[in-house]
Image (spheres, rainbow, N blue to C red):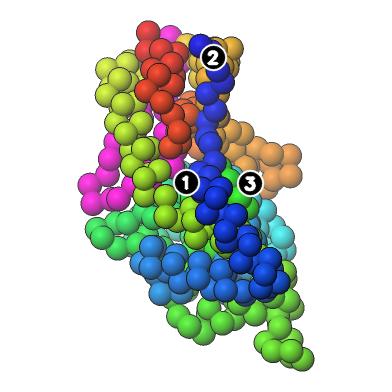
Amino acid sequence: MENKQITVTSPLLPDLEDFNLMLKEIWSSKWITNNGSFHRQLEAALCEYLKVPYISLFTNGTLPLITALQALNISGEVITTPFSFVATTHSIWWNGIKPVFVDIDPLTCNIDPDKIEAAITPRTTAIMPVHCYGNPCDTARIQAIADKYGLKVIYDAAHAFGVDVNGKSLLEAGDMSTLSFHATKVYNTIEGGALVMHDEQTKKRIDFLKNFGFAGETEVVAPGINGKMDEMRSAYGLLALKIVDDAIEARRQVALKYREALKDVKGVRFFDETAGVKHNYSYFPIFIDAQEYGMTRDELYFKMKENNVLGRRYFYPLISSFSTYKGLDSASDTNLPVATRIANEVICLPMHHDLSENDVERVLTQIVK
Ligand SMILES: *Cc1c(COP(=O)(O)O)cnc(C)c1O
């Protein structure tokens, strides 16, 4: 297996025997969804792990984005980043809201706070930033802008599971934050996600909204959706939570090796550790300066692919470049010069808990000349 395929990610799978024992419990209880015992246990365990007071589980990471916009009665226009997974912008569109793209900061790949104010109009009601690759947004600056204009802030924290800033959870920022527990993420429940909120009343409202708006057997208090996580995936999530710290440590080791080997390669840029930030090593993006490196990003990407090392051009194309969104005024390349450039420079290298030393060597051989 000299040349086995090295994938960009690999799901963190819990112990199968342990999972089977939990499945037996579920089978004998015959309670398979609708806020069962494992669902409640996972919410409690995640509150503790993530150091947040309230969380509501969802069946994926897109419904919490859609539901947060609903719960906060967001309308009109929402300012967001084009450098993300399409679900961020889709959630805005699905609520009949106009997304307004703002360019990113090349040093974090997050929405550039310096450029937010110019995009605010009388119709703007919220900002939806993304902690891209788990890099924390400048939450203080964004909150100051939001306060000045009376805007809500919903963070798409799909990449930021377990990321702390100065010992505090990044999920404390803004009005709400969303998480994704998709198979490809640092922590997964196969499919899954969550909404993090700061008070009990909001938690209650979100719990109603994700269950069709039911507030009891005969009362529907809002036009809700079905976003519930079932018992099987909640049980899986409890087991995955026990091994996620080891997985993050394994990722950290890979990041250390990548950084050490790439630090003197001309034309290859990557992120360093940020002081005060507990990272989750969810991705390892590198940025190729074709002039300096002597090869374009795409040439390197396809060379890697030929050698069975699968990187991912993440995020490329920009959300604003997809045909669905490219007609928007804010989607033009001239409005988004940094995001446009970065989207053409980036490759995420294989990054997961299951990479061997030999795998890491093989990845690096592709890049270091
Ligand atoms: C993965 C992801 C989502 C969507 O999550 P799903 O669980 O796949 O629905 C949303 N935003 C970002 C930035 C993501 O990476």
- Residue at 52 percent across and 30 percent down: it is 8
Query: Tag 1's secondary structure?
Result: loop
Query: Tag 2's secondary structure?
Result: loop
Furthest residue toward bottom = 218
Which residue is denoted by mark 2 in the rendering?
Answer: 1
Q: Which label was assigned to residue 86?
A: 3
Q: Which residues are magenta?
A: 269-294
The 10 Å Cα crowd at callout 2, few under 14, some 14 to 19, many 20 or more, is few
Please state the horizontal and vertical placement of residue 166, each as a whole percent of the image. Answer: 24, 58
- Residue at 43 percent across and 9 percent down: it is 294
Kindly tell me whether residue 133 is visible in this rendering: yes
Please state the horizontal and vertical placement of residue 303, each as a whole percent of the image. Answer: 54, 12
Which residue is denoted by mark 1 in the rendering?
Answer: 186
Vertical placement of residue 247 versus 289, above or below: below
Judging depth in this view, the residue of 269 and 4 nearest the camera is 4
- In the rendered structure, which disc, 1 or 3, sits on the residue that comes first in sequence? 3
Judging depth in this view, the residue of 247 and 72 nearest the camera is 247
C-alpha gap between disc 1 and disc 3: 19 Å
Query: Tag 3's secondary structure?
Result: loop
- Residue at 54 percent across and 28 percent down: it is 7
Tell me if 258 is positioned left or right of 310 in this view. Answer: left
C-alpha gap between disc 1 and disc 2: 26 Å
Judging depth in this view, the residue of 205 and 118 nearest the camera is 205
Please state the horizontal and vertical placement of residue 110, each as a whole percent of the image. Answer: 44, 46
- The quadrant the C terminus occupies is top left
Q: Quadrant of residue 212?
A: bottom right
Residue 290 colored magenta?
yes
Tell me if 144 is positioned left or right of 63 in this view. Answer: left
The 10 Å Cα crowd at callout 1, few under 14, some 14 to 19, many 20 or more, is many
Q: Which kind of residue does numbered mark 2 sit on?
A: Met
Residue 4 colored magenta?
no
Asked whether the beta carbons under mark 3 and mark 2 sit within 8 Å of each other, the answer is no
